[in-house]
Protein backbone atom coordinates (compact mmCIF):
# COMPACT_ATOMS: atom_id res chain seq x y z
CA UNK A 1 0.00 0.00 0.00
CA UNK A 2 1.27 3.49 -0.79
CA UNK A 3 1.54 6.26 1.80
CA UNK A 4 -0.40 9.48 1.11
CA UNK A 5 0.31 12.67 3.05
CA UNK A 6 -1.19 16.15 2.75
CA UNK A 7 0.38 19.35 4.04
CA UNK A 8 0.07 23.08 3.27
CA UNK A 9 1.55 24.05 -0.10
CA UNK A 10 4.87 25.89 0.15
CA UNK A 11 6.91 27.36 -2.63
CA UNK A 12 6.10 28.49 -6.12
CA UNK A 13 2.61 27.67 -7.37
CA UNK A 14 2.58 25.27 -10.29
CA UNK A 15 1.55 26.93 -13.57
CA UNK A 16 -1.21 24.36 -14.11
CA UNK A 17 -3.32 25.26 -11.04
CA UNK A 18 -6.15 27.80 -11.14
CA UNK A 19 -5.32 31.21 -9.69
CA UNK A 20 -7.65 31.05 -6.71
CA UNK A 21 -7.48 27.60 -5.19
CA UNK A 22 -6.97 26.08 -1.79
CA UNK A 23 -3.56 24.46 -2.34
CA UNK A 24 -1.97 21.50 -0.60
CA UNK A 25 1.08 19.37 -1.18
CA UNK A 26 0.18 15.74 -1.75
CA UNK A 27 3.07 13.30 -1.37
CA UNK A 28 2.77 9.75 -2.60
CA UNK A 29 5.30 7.10 -1.55
CA UNK A 30 5.25 3.54 -2.80
CA UNK A 31 7.13 1.04 -4.93
CA UNK A 32 9.06 1.97 -8.07
CA UNK A 33 6.84 1.97 -11.17
CA UNK A 34 3.70 1.29 -9.12
CA UNK A 35 0.49 2.29 -10.90
CA UNK A 36 -2.12 4.08 -8.88
CA UNK A 37 -5.33 6.04 -9.32
CA UNK A 38 -6.10 8.78 -6.80
CA UNK A 39 -9.58 10.22 -6.38
CA UNK A 40 -11.08 13.00 -4.27
CA UNK A 41 -14.27 12.29 -2.35
CA UNK A 42 -16.53 14.40 -0.17
CA UNK A 43 -16.53 17.61 -2.21
CA UNK A 44 -19.70 19.66 -2.00
CA UNK A 45 -21.54 20.66 -5.18
CA UNK A 46 -19.77 23.47 -6.98
CA UNK A 47 -16.24 22.43 -6.01
CA UNK A 48 -13.58 20.70 -8.12
CA UNK A 49 -10.48 18.91 -6.91
CA UNK A 50 -7.37 19.05 -9.09
CA UNK A 51 -4.31 16.81 -8.90
CA UNK A 52 -1.54 18.81 -10.58
CA UNK A 53 1.98 18.26 -11.80
CA UNK A 54 4.17 20.80 -13.57
CA UNK A 55 2.73 19.62 -16.89
CA UNK A 56 -0.93 18.86 -16.30
CA UNK A 57 -3.87 19.15 -13.90
CA UNK A 58 -6.21 16.19 -13.61
CA UNK A 59 -9.71 17.02 -12.35
CA UNK A 60 -11.20 14.81 -9.64
CA UNK A 61 -8.79 11.91 -10.14
CA UNK A 62 -5.21 11.21 -11.16
CA UNK A 63 -3.65 8.16 -12.78
CA UNK A 64 0.01 7.87 -11.79
CA UNK A 65 2.95 5.61 -12.38
CA UNK A 66 5.46 6.24 -9.61
CA UNK A 67 9.03 6.98 -10.72
CA UNK A 68 12.07 4.81 -9.96
CA UNK A 69 12.40 6.19 -6.42
CA UNK A 70 8.70 5.46 -5.71
CA UNK A 71 7.92 9.07 -4.73
CA UNK A 72 5.66 11.66 -6.35
CA UNK A 73 4.79 15.22 -5.32
CA UNK A 74 1.55 16.78 -6.53
CA UNK A 75 -0.18 20.06 -5.92
CA UNK A 76 -3.70 19.22 -4.75
CA UNK A 77 -6.04 22.14 -5.41
CA UNK A 78 -9.65 22.77 -4.45
CA UNK A 79 -11.42 25.21 -6.72
CA UNK A 80 -14.83 26.75 -6.08
CA UNK A 81 -17.01 27.08 -9.18
CA UNK A 82 -19.99 28.86 -7.63
CA UNK A 83 -20.57 31.36 -4.85
CA UNK A 84 -22.65 29.03 -2.69
CA UNK A 85 -21.15 29.16 0.81
CA UNK A 86 -19.86 26.03 2.49
CA UNK A 87 -18.89 25.98 6.17
CA UNK A 88 -16.72 22.90 6.33
CA UNK A 89 -15.46 20.37 3.81
CA UNK A 90 -14.20 16.94 4.76
CA UNK A 91 -12.20 15.70 1.82
CA UNK A 92 -10.78 12.19 1.44
CA UNK A 93 -8.14 11.34 -1.09
CA UNK A 94 -8.24 7.64 -1.82
CA UNK A 95 -5.80 5.49 -3.75
CA UNK A 96 -6.89 2.53 -5.85
CA UNK A 97 -4.82 0.33 -3.49
CA UNK A 98 -6.98 1.36 -0.49
CA UNK A 99 -4.66 4.07 0.85
CA UNK A 100 -6.33 7.24 2.17
CA UNK A 101 -5.61 10.63 3.63
CA UNK A 102 -8.14 13.20 4.87
CA UNK A 103 -8.32 16.94 5.34
CA UNK A 104 -10.88 19.30 6.87
CA UNK A 105 -11.18 22.72 5.22
CA UNK A 106 -13.16 25.75 6.31
CA UNK A 107 -13.54 27.82 3.12
CA UNK A 108 -13.94 31.11 5.00
CA UNK A 109 -10.14 31.14 5.02
CA UNK A 110 -8.67 32.93 2.03
CA UNK A 111 -7.36 30.60 -0.68
CA UNK A 112 -3.74 30.77 -1.73
CA UNK A 113 -3.33 33.36 -4.52
Image (cartoon, helix red, strand yellow):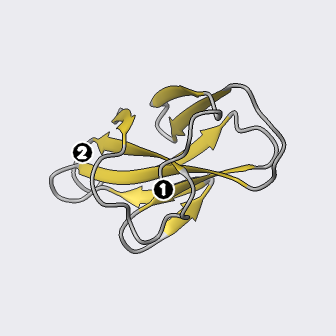
Residue at 30% over, 60% down:
12
Task: Describe residue 53's horizontal placement relative to residue 39 as left or right.
Answer: left
Q: Is residue 87 above or below residue 72?
A: above
- Are there few (<14), some (14-19), or many (20+) residues within 10 Å of tag 1? few
Tell me if I can see residue 35 in this picture: no
Outermost residue, bottom side: 55
Task: Describe residue 39's horizontal placement relative to residue 17 as left or right.
Answer: right
Judged by depth in the image, the label closer to the viewer, 1 or 2, is 1
Q: Which residue is mark 2?
A: 31
Tell me if I can see residue 3 in this picture: yes
Q: Report the front residue among 29 and 18.
A: 18
Q: N-terminal of the two: label 1 or label 2?
A: 2
- Are there few (<14), some (14-19), or many (20+) residues within 10 Å of tag 2? some
The image position of residue 25, as x and y in percent, is 36, 44
Label 2: element kind: loop
Q: Which residue is mark 1?
A: 113
The image position of residue 54, as x and y in percent, is 35, 69
Q: Report the front residue among 84 and 63.
A: 84
The image position of residue 100, as x and y in percent, is 48, 29
Amino acid sequence: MVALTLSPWHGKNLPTVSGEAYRYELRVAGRANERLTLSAQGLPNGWIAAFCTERVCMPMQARLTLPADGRERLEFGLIQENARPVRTMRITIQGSDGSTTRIVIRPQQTPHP
